[in-house]
Image (cartoon, rainbow, N blue to C red):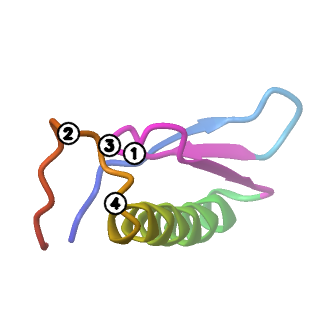
Amino acid sequence: MKLKVIITPGEDRGFVARAPAFRGCWSQGATREEAVTNIREAIEAWLDVEQDKAERGEVPTDAELISV
């Protein structure tokens, strides 16, 4: 699966990475490469949490679950 990730310079130093497709999913790293590695891990964790919510029935009534 390919996802759009936006990487920007951090305010002080380093880089901030965010995945716009996943609300609140962001990470950072000292280097661009580290930020990419970290956002991959953050996306995996985000998806795991959402899957757990779905399994517990905590999905909004207007949501649709699909497999990718």
Instruction: Check contact, mark 3 vs mark 4: CB within 8 A.
Output: no
Pointer 4: what residue? 57
Residue at left offset 73%, top offset 59% = 31
Instruction: Tell me where the magenta segment starts and ends, as one range.
Output: 15-30
Q: Measure how far apart labels 2 and 4 are at the Cα level.
A: 10 Å
Residue at left offset 41%, top offset 67% = 56
Q: Quadrant of residue 1?
A: bottom left
Q: Measure how far apart labels 3 and 2 are at the Cα level.
A: 20 Å
Graded by Cα atoms within 10 Å as few (under 14), some (14 to 19) or many (20 or more), the crowding at tag 4 reads: few
Instruction: Check contact, mark 1 vs mark 3: CB within 8 A.
Output: yes
Compared to residue 54, the image places residue 37 above or below, namely below
Q: Measure how far apart labels 1 and 2 are at the Cα level.
A: 19 Å
Graded by Cα atoms within 10 Å as few (under 14), some (14 to 19) or many (20 or more), the crowding at tag 3 reads: few
Q: Measure how far apart labels 4 and 1 are at the Cα level.
A: 19 Å
Question: Taking 52 as reference, is 30 left or right?
Answer: right
In the current view of this chain or complex, which residue is farthest to the right? Answer: 12
SS label for mark 3: loop
- Position of the C terminus, as image quadrant, is bottom left
Number of marks in the image?
Answer: 4
Label placed on residue 61: 2
Pointer 1: what residue? 22
